[in-house]
Amino acid sequence: MSAEGQATGGKAGSYQKPANKTFAHDPKIPSMDGVKLVNYDFKKYGSSAERRRIIEKWEKEVNSLSR
């Protein structure tokens, strides 16, 4: 995650937010100001039981639909 390593993203057309704070910000990288992030509940949705429940619901309600 060196600044040099982060610069390779721009050369490849990948403009994600850099992890290295010393990286010279490329003007093509979108600003994160004003971006609303999801307040994800890792304790609830990270449990095995909740994961199983969500996958079962997906299978029943979405994946079972005809294509």
Image (cartoon, rainbow, N blue to C red):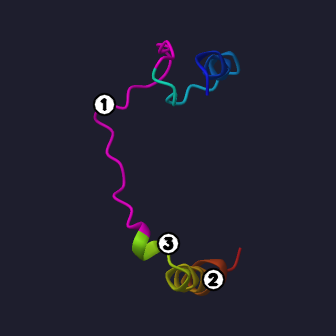
CA–CA distance in space, label 2 to label 1: 37 Å
Q: Hey, what amino acid is under mark 3?
A: Gly
Q: Residue at x 63, y 26 (%)?
A: 14
Q: Quadrant of the C terminus?
A: bottom right
Compare residues 49 and 33 and report the one nearer the observer: 49
Q: Residue at x 55, y 78 (%)?
A: 51
Residue 37 in picture, x, y percent from top left: 35, 48
Mark 3 residue crowding within 10 angstroms, few (<14) / some (14–19) / many (20+): few
Examine the residues drawn in magenta and state their main secondary structure.
loop
Based on the picture, tell me whether residue 23 belongs to the magenta stretch: yes
Q: Which residue is mark 1?
A: 33
From which residue to which does the magenta span run?
22-42
Of labels 3 and 2, the one closer to you: 3
Q: Say which residue appears at 49% left-offset and 82% top-offset.
A: 50
> Mark 2, residues whose alpha carbon is within 10 Å: few (<14), some, or many (≥20)?
few
Using the numbered discs, state the Cα–Cα distance from disc 1 to disc 3 in whole angstroms: 28 Å
Quarter location, residue 13: top right
Instruction: Name the quadrant of the N terminus.
Output: top right
Residue 53, percent from left and from top? 53, 86
Q: Which residue is under mark 2?
A: 59
In three-dimensional space, the C-alpha distance between marks 3 and 2, rounded to whole angstroms, equals 19 Å
